[in-house]
Image (cartoon, grey):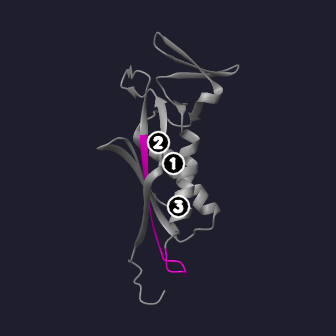
Amino acid sequence: MTGERPADQRHVTVEGVRLRFAAAHMATLGDELEPLHGHNYVVRCRVEGDLTADRWVIDFSVLKRVVREACEQLDHRFLLQRESRAVAAVEVEGGWEVRFSDRVYRFPASDVMPLPIENTTAELLAEWLWTRAADALRAGGHHNIRRIAVDVEEMPGQSGGYARDLG
C-alpha cells in the first residue's frame, strides 16, 4: 500500500458492556480444587493487521460481534475443564458428573459448557476465546489480520490473556 512500510502495524481493540459473560467454575491449584464459584468476566480483544482497501483493519462492529458470540457460548454456564488431570468429568444421562477427591458434583447438561482445556484459568479461557475469534475472522475473509490478543478479566485489576500471530 502506498506510503506504508512493511513494519507498520495498525490495531483495533474492542471491549465493553456486551463483551462479557457470567459463569461458574472450579479451577485446580496444585492438588487443590477451588470451591464452586463464579465471576462476571470482562473480555477485551485486540487485532493487529494491515489496512484494507477501505483503510481500516476491521470494522469495530464485526470484531465486537465475533467476540460477543463467543462470550454468549460461556454466559450463565458452568465452565468444565474437560482435559483436567485432576478433575474427572463424565457425561452421564442428562448431564455431567464431576469428581475430585471425595467430592462429586452433578450438573444438568444445559448448564455446562465442556471446554477442551486443562483448567478454567483466565489465561486458558482467553486462549479458548482467541481460537473462536481466529476461526470466525478467517471464515469471514479477514486475511489482513496478523495477530489477535484476548484478555479475560475475572475481577477489576486481575486478568489473564493469550496472544498469538495468525498462521
Name the front one of labels 3 and 1.
Answer: 3
The kind of residue tagged 1 is: Leu
Q: Secondary structure at mark 1?
A: helix
Query: Quick one: 72 or 125, which is closer to the camera?
Result: 72
11 displayed left or right of 156? right
Is mark 3 in CB contact (under 8 Å) with mark 1? Answer: no
Q: Residue at x 42, y 34 (%)?
A: 39
* Residue at the far front in the pictured view: 17
Give the Cα separation between the discs numbered 2 and 3: 18 Å
Instruction: In the displayed orientation, state which residue is furthest to the bottom.
Output: 2
In front of the other: label 2 or label 3?
3
- Please indicate, yes or no, whether residue 16 appears anywhere in the rendered image: yes
Residue 145 lies left or right of residue 40; in this view the side is: right
Q: Is residue 58 above or below residue 162?
A: below
Give the labeled residue for mark 2. 125
Q: Which residue is mark 3?
A: 63
Q: Is residue 39 above or below residue 98?
A: below
Residue 112, image x and y in percent? 59, 30
Q: Which residues are magenta?
A: 41-56
| Image point (51%, 48%), residue name | 129
Verify CB contact (< 8 Å) between mark 1 and mark 2.
Answer: yes
Q: Which residue is mark 1?
A: 129
Disc 2: CA contacts within 10 A as few (<14), some (14-19) or many (>=20): many
Question: Does residue 73 belong to the magenta stretch?
Answer: no
Give the distance between the C-alpha atoms of the residues marked 3 and 1, in whole angstroms: 12 Å
Residue 51, position as x, y percentages in the image: 49, 77
Residue 46 located within the stretch drawn in magenta: yes
Q: Earlier in the sequence, mark 3 or mark 1?
A: 3
